[in-house]
Amino acid sequence: MRKLSLHPSPDATSQLQVGFAYWATLTAAPLPNPAHQQVALLNARFVVALAQQYQQQGCSQQELLDAAYRALVHQMQTASPAQVERFLAHDVRQAMLLALEAKP
């Protein structure tokens, strides 16, 4: 079995910091339910790391984070906080993949 080894780029830490800062600005607006606000903040690391994985495929990190935030807000408008936590990973991943497909 092939062993996977990750070699982060030298500026990976700075890219993460930029991603966290951008996600913080997106989630700064208060959401209607405080539980939703907490879900958005607790999943910041996951969303930023996922965007970092997909950004080499044609979209910038900010475009991917925007798509993830739109998916998060849509999910929050239609589901309870427990359901948002349960399906967030799938919805965010799907939103990022749709953003990549929409890019020429």
Image (spheres, helix red, strand yellow):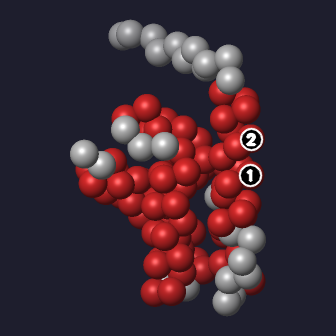
Q: Is residue 83 visible?
A: no
Q: Position of residue 88 (x, y in %)?
A: 50, 64
Please provide percent x and percent y for residue 18. Answer: 70, 43
Q: Residue at x 46, y 38 (%)?
A: 55
User: Which of the two residues, 7 or 21, is positioned nearer the viewer here?
Assistant: 21
Crowding around mark 1 (Cα neighbors within 10 Å: few <14, some 14 to 19, many 20+) is few
Please report the residue visible at 42 percent of the width from the left and 64 percent of the height from the top: 91
Q: CA distance from mark 2 to mark 1?
A: 6 Å
* Mark 1, residue position: 21
- Image quadrant holding the N terminus, namely top left
Can residue 49 be seen in the rendering of this structure?
Answer: yes
Quadrant housing residue 28: bottom right
x, y percentage for residue 76? 54, 81
Query: What SS does tag 2 mark?
Result: helix
- Which residue is label 2 attached to? 17
In depth, the one of 76 and 62 nearer the eye is: 62
Q: Reply above or below: 47 against 66.
A: above
Q: Is residue 33 above or below residue 56?
A: below
Q: x, y (%) of residue 36?
A: 66, 78
CA neighbours of label 2 inside 10 A, class few (<14), some (14 to 19), many (20+): few
Q: Residue at x 66, y 57 (%)?
A: 23
Label 1 residue SS = helix
Image check: 102 left or right of 33? left
Q: Is residue 46 left or right of residue 91?
A: right
Decide: is 92 above or below 28. Answer: above
Contact flag, marks 2 and 1 (Cβ < 8 Å) = yes
- Three-letter residue code for mark 2: Gln
